[in-house]
Image (cartoon, helix red, strand yellow):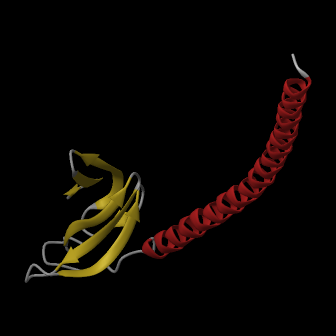
Amino acid sequence: MAGPQQIEVLGLVTQMGVMMRDQREENRQLRQDVAVMREMLDGQLSDFNRRLSLAEARGALNAAMGAAAAERPPARQAQAGGRSEERRRYRVQAASPGLAMLAEIDRSGEAGASLQVSVGHEIPGYGRVQSIGQEGSTWIVRAERGAIQ
């Protein structure tokens, strides 16, 4: 190789060395950025999980407080023939396994007062709730003296 060719080759090798050094520096910086982002994401995910747990606990507490209010004994109405309570009509407004919201249906067919029940609660005219489950797309509350859909 002639002198000018050797100088050109050495210049190219030097340029490649500089490019490799720059690439290594960029890779190091990218790894550092990924580590910072991972730490930030882990912190945000932890905060989200904490907030979700608090929201679920708040919902469960509200449901329990509503269920406690529904446990109050219903007023019984005397009727002829010695029966002690009037059978009311209900329909299931909303339900989940073990918990249901019933709407009392008045004589006109309109929904009236709501009643939140779970297994073991007393429903006027139906007795104690034995199960709350889904059959197909229909939720059914089964009690001692009948079922409500």
- Identify whether 125 is placed above or below 17: below
In the displayed structure image, the side of residue 96 where residue 125 appears, left or right: left
Q: Residue furthest left?
A: 108
- Identify whether 110 is placed above or below 129: below
Residue drawn where x is 48% and y is 76% of the image: 69
In the displayed structure image, the side of residue 6 where residue 47 appears, left or right: left
Residue drawn where x is 84% and y is 31% of the image: 8
> Depth check: 104 or 45 in front?
45
Residue 77 makes an appearance in the image: no
Residue drawn where x is 88% and y is 28% of the image: 4
In the displayed structure image, the side of residue 6 where residue 61 appears, left or right: left
Where residue 20 appears, as percent x and y from the top left, is 83, 35
In the displayed structure image, the side of residue 135 where residue 116 appears, left or right: right
Where residue 3 appears, as percent x and y from the top left, is 92, 24
The C terminus sits in image quarter: bottom left
Corner quadrant of residue 12: top right
> Depth check: 16 or 60 in front?
16
Where residue 48 appears, as percent x and y from the top left, is 65, 61
The N terminus sits in image quarter: top right
> Depth check: 143 or 115 in front?
115
Where residue 87 appears, as percent x and y from the top left, is 19, 70
